[in-house]
Image (cartoon, grey):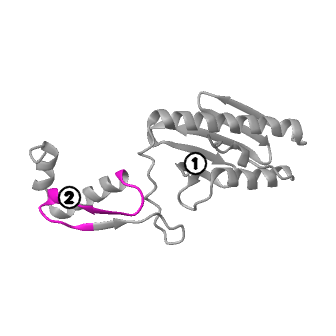
Amino acid sequence: MSGTPVLSLLRQSSRKWTWKLYQRLATNVYCGSIHVKAPFLNCTPNITWHQPSFTSGHHRNYCTNSLSEIKFEELAEETLERLSEKFDDIAETVDCDDEYDVSYGSGVLTAKISREWGTYVINKQTPNKQIWLSSPVSGPKRYDYVDKRWIYKHDGVPMMDLLTQELSEALSTHIDFKSCEEEDS
């Protein structure tokens, strides 16, 4: 493996630049708390990554790379379908604004709550293995799949908790989105 063009290029470049590249690659590959050695650098620097702390400002180590594209597609579609059904059920069980409207197609869910409140747009981003949510209240968020929940890695708040809070406020009644999370198999 030492004769590969990538390793040759890494050895020829400056050690500082190489180590930063190695850290970036390793951060995108490994999950959890790990211990890494970089033997191709002709040295043995050690580094430990930890699970993110939502209070310390370290938020980079969520790993969705272990999720296959097929599994991501399956999970994202199931989640978006459950959300679509939930938004449709809301219209049948809660007194909603005349402009309340829900549409779902091609991996994009749009829910217009009212002219005053605004519109939610939720869609899957397959290349990033994320679900993106645009909220008229809290703005855009990108959710990673962690421990059977879609989590916003910057504050640790699950997508269903955010939707429960914001939609309950918008419709002045408790709306629980937890039923939209993955069912245990």
Query: In this rendering, does residue 98 appear at all?
Result: no
Q: Quadrant of the C terminus?
A: top right
Helix, strand or loop for disc 1: loop
| Residue holding disc 1 | 148
Q: Quadrant of the N terminus?
A: top left
171 left or right, relative to 163 = right
Give the residue type at disc 2: Thr
Instruction: Indicate whether 136 appears above or below 45.
Output: above
Instruction: Determine if the magenta segment contains residue 30.
Output: yes
Residue under the point 71% across and 50% down: 163
Residue under the point 56% across and 49% down: 143
Closer-to-camera residue (172/1): 1
Give the residue type at disc 1: Lys
- Residue 39 lies, in percent from the top left, at 16, 59
Tag of residue 18: 2
Which quadrant of the view contains residue 26?
bottom left
Residue under the point 61% across and 46% down: 133
Residue under the point 45% across and 35% down: 69
Instruction: Indicate whether 33 appears above or below 63.
Output: below
Instruction: Determine if the magenta segment contains residue 171.
Output: no
Which quadrant of the view contains residue 19?
bottom left
Q: Residues within 10 Å of mark 2 (few under 14, many from 20)?
A: some
- Residue 3 lies, in percent from the top left, at 8, 44
62 left or right, relative to 110 = left
- Residue 135 lies, in percent from the top left, at 67, 49
19 left or right, relative to 33 = left
Q: Residues within 10 Å of mark 1 (few under 14, many from 20)?
A: few
Q: Which residues are magenta?
A: 29-46
Q: Residue furthest right?
A: 95
